Structures are given as structure tokens and as C-alpha cells.
Amino acid sequence: MRIGMFISGTSIYGSTIDEVIDTARWADAARLDTGWVPHIPWSLDALTAVALAGRETARIELGTAVVPTWSHHPYGMAQHALTAQAACGGRLAFGIGPSHRTVAEGWYGADYDGVIHHMRDYVAVLDACSAAQHEANASGGGPGGYGGPVQFEGQRYRVSSMIDVPGATEVPVFLAALAPLMLRLAGERAAGTITWMADEHTHATHVVPRLASAAAAVGRPTPRVIAGLPVAVCDDRSLGLEVAEANYGMYRHMENYARMLELGESGSPGEVAIIGTEAQVAARIRSYEDAGVTDLAAMTFAVGADDAERTRNLARTRELLAALAN
């Protein structure tokens, strides 16, 4: 299992660019496998933050978890992602998703009905742009020096253009796939899925089998399964559960995540979170690996009776992740 962590926060205040870069540098030096930036609609742009972190790190894979598709036309999104890929030196894991109906319709003025058709076309445009970038790289700039051609005509999007971002390579796309049709699309065409608020049971009985079946049907190996999970090392697990419920309890009221909680055995965001001593947390992480999860994206959070204890426990959490990664 690859061990990674979010290098930017998801609180209402988010993180500053300096905080993202400092955490990315720490994760890189600690030899974590991955560092993830959430795209909070009112805060930092995830791809820009990843691009900046990419210039300050050497080896760690950097990902977005996840950018809402409605925020960009797919051709514009591809250009943005290819630019971030160039900045990262080929270390970008590009996570996208349709978000929630309230975000799509309320924030972006989009029509969420038939969202799977939107996602199929969106992924197709991204794939066409990656293929065009590959062609441009192979030919030294594409026909006439104007980049590789991008041609696509679907139900939701049509593109007739070209692309050639200097220094960029093809971008692996990961989908925030939770529902059956999205998992099928991820299995057929994506590099993997990124989940949130799903316990071991949900991964083992819902996520991994559907992803694997869809991939096998088109002759592909099973893509990566990246589990985003709150993680806290502490000695007082009861307090940890209280903090987790306070921090993440809102997700039980969000339709997509509520369905994941209903499919699981835990039933609550606090129980999905990985909380306890170093030994307890390591054992719980192994249970996700046993369920077929290939990557941990840890959303670390602090537990303690006072600031000093919270700081110590947050450091313990990071140290454990580094030890597991190594």
C-alpha cells in the first residue's frame, strides 16, 4: 500500500500556500509516497497549489482530491493539468469529480441531471488532450509545430483544437467514483478512484469489486484505489472519536457520502476515521489494504486535551505515516 497524506487542510479556512509547500517539503523528505491537495471551492485552487508544491519537492507524487469538473471546460482543465504536470516533473495524480448536486447547481450553475454522461465526455476530452500531448512530444511539436490535434464530439462537449504544453507529459486521471456507474467508468478508463467516508467493508464489497469487474471487461488491470481517510494517533480513542465527529460529522448529511456510510459497517464518520495508538492505527490501515485499497490518503487531525497534547499527537501521526511509508 502506498502511504500518503493531505498536504492542505479542508477546514473552512483552508491552508495558505506557504503551509501547503512546507507540508509538501516535509512529506517529500519523510519519503511519503503521495501528497494530496483538496480543491475547496472557496479557497486555494488545487492544481495551482500542486504546481507550486511540485517546484519545491523532488520525488513525491502530488495529487488533487478532487477538482470539481464544473469549474473548467474539459479542454481548459486539460491545459491547466498539463501545466501542473510540467511543473511537477511528471509527478501529478489528477483527481477530478462531479462533486455534489448542490455544488454543481448552486455554485457553478450547472445541470446535474445525467451527470454520468457529463463525466464520460469530460474524461474523453481529457484523454484526447493527453494523447495529443503525447503526439506533440513524439513529433517534436506536432504537425507544423502547433501541437497535437484534439478532436472530440460527444453529447456534452465538442472540441476541435490542438495542444502542446512545453515540458508536459500525459496526465493520469483519477475519478472520485462512489456510485456504480462512476466506478464502472473509472474501471474502464481511469487510472483509479479516490474515495472518502468509506470503511473497509464498503471498499471490499462495493468499490473494489465494481472497479475490478469493469476493468477486466475491457482487458485492463484493476486501477488504483485511493482511500481518503481521517487519521489521528492518540492514547484516548474516546476523545478522538468526539473530535472526529465534530470535524467530519457533516459528511453524513451530504448525499453521496451518506450512501457510502450506509453501505459500511461503521455507519458514522467518527467510526470510519482511523483513530488510536500507533499500533491500533497501523492495524486499521492494514485492514484497508486487506480490503483491496492500494493507497492511503490520510487527512491528519489533532486530538488532545490542550494545544500541547494536540501538537504532540499530530507529530506522532505524521511520524507513524512516515514509518509505514518506509
Image: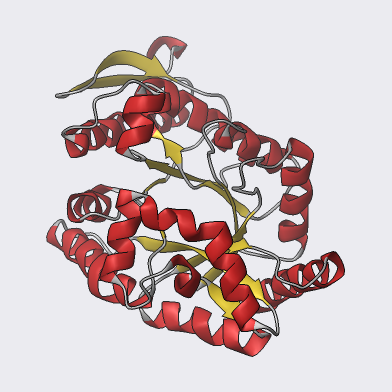
Q: Nearer the viewer, residue 190 or 265?
A: 265
Identified at 33% across, 60% down, the residue is 223
Identified at 56% across, 28% down, the residue is 83
- Eyeballing the image, is 279 above or below 109? below
Res. 326 in view: no
Q: Residue 323 placed where, x, y %?
A: 70, 78
- Eyeballing the image, is 166 above or below 185? above
**Which quadrant of the figure has residue 205?**
bottom left
Q: Nearer the viewer, residue 187 or 137?
A: 187
Identified at 39% across, 72% down, the residue is 199
204 to the left or right of 213: right
**Which quadrant of the figure has residue 210?**
bottom left
- Eyeballing the image, is 123 above or below 225? above
**Which quadrant of the figure has residue 240?**
bottom right
Q: Residue 130 placed where, x, y %?
A: 38, 33
Q: Residue 161 placed where, x, y %?
A: 33, 13
Q: Nearer the viewer, residue 20 or 302?
A: 302
**Quadrant of the snapshot with the C terminus:** bottom right
Identified at 31% across, 62% down, the residue is 260
Q: Residue furthest right?
A: 308
- Eyeballing the image, is 164 above or below 214? above
254 to the left or right of 28: left
Q: Residue 155 placed where, x, y %?
A: 14, 24
